[in-house]
Image (cartoon, helix red, strand yellow):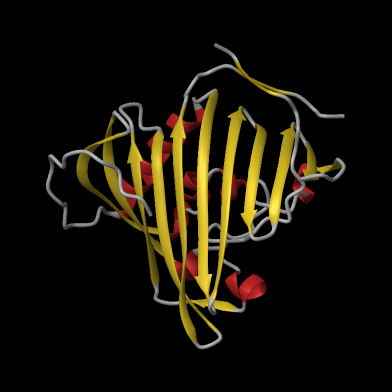
Amino acid sequence: MDRYRPALGVAVVWLVLATGCLPDDGSASPTGEQSTTQVSTPEPRSDIDAWVEQYTAAVAGTTTVHVVVRQEMVSGGETTIAHLEVDMSGTDRYGEVQIDPDGAFLIVVVGDTAYAKPDGGVWDEMPRRLLAFSELHINPAATITVQRVSITAIELVASEDVDGVPTDHYVITYDVAKRTDLPMSVHYGAVLKGDTITADLWVDAQMRPVRYESTIMVRKDMATGRVVVQAVYSGYGTPVTIEPPV
């Protein structure tokens, strides 16, 4: 059945959580049994690049997918939670966003044009590149492709079922110094703790993302905080209609 998303959109002054604020490039645990043991030896750089190429090709072959993202930042005694539900069709996007405590938004991206509207507000049209959120906000697993040069290790730790889907569970390690999408101090007065960041990725038999999770520890106002991102991918190949709202 075709899942129709009318091109209602969301003006998002989007929170830059663990994904940062890159220009647009076009921590619940899953249930299920672990059937493989942890791999302790990181892969050589050539193997990392080959794995990322294979993953990128699998994602590029995807026509449509539905993504649900939850982002939480706890720092300086404050908690901000963003929930995003989005359909992706090629490079087009339709998303419904709830940012607590700030409010709800809708957003549509068609081609090079973005449309955004806060709850109860009016539509704003702009070039896609000026939309105040990153592609990585609605597609956190794209971090693997966009920030590939910062990856220092990819380790297969288990084979698990995620929401009934057989998956391979990988742990991705990033070098913080080589990440270009983490301007935390600009937005929160927060600074990153540690030299590396790890993320958990579950991929299906076609090597497409099923779940992606990462936690970044930060310091703000002399307090320790964290940024947690969780994304769940489903509905690969389900027809989706995304149209301009105006």
- Looking at the image, which residue is at 54% across and 79% down? 76
Quarter of the rendering occupied by the N terminus: top right
Residue 64 vs 170, above or below: the answer is above
Q: Residue at x 12, y 48 (%)?
A: 37
Q: Nearer the viewer, residue 199 or 77?
A: 77
Q: Residue 192, image x and y in percent?
A: 48, 75
Q: In the rendering, at what x and y percent does residue 39 appear?
A: 16, 52
Residue 131 visible within the image: yes
The quarter of the displayed image where residue 110 is located: top right
Residue 93 as seen in the image, left or right of residue 203: right
Which residue sits furthest bottom?
A: 222
Describe residue 40's horizontal placement relative to residue 84 as left or right: left
> Picture coordinates of residue 218 (x, y %)?
47, 75
In the image, what residue occupies the spot 61% across and 27% down? 90
Residue 101: x and y in percent read 64, 60
Q: Residue at x 44, y 66 (%)?
A: 216
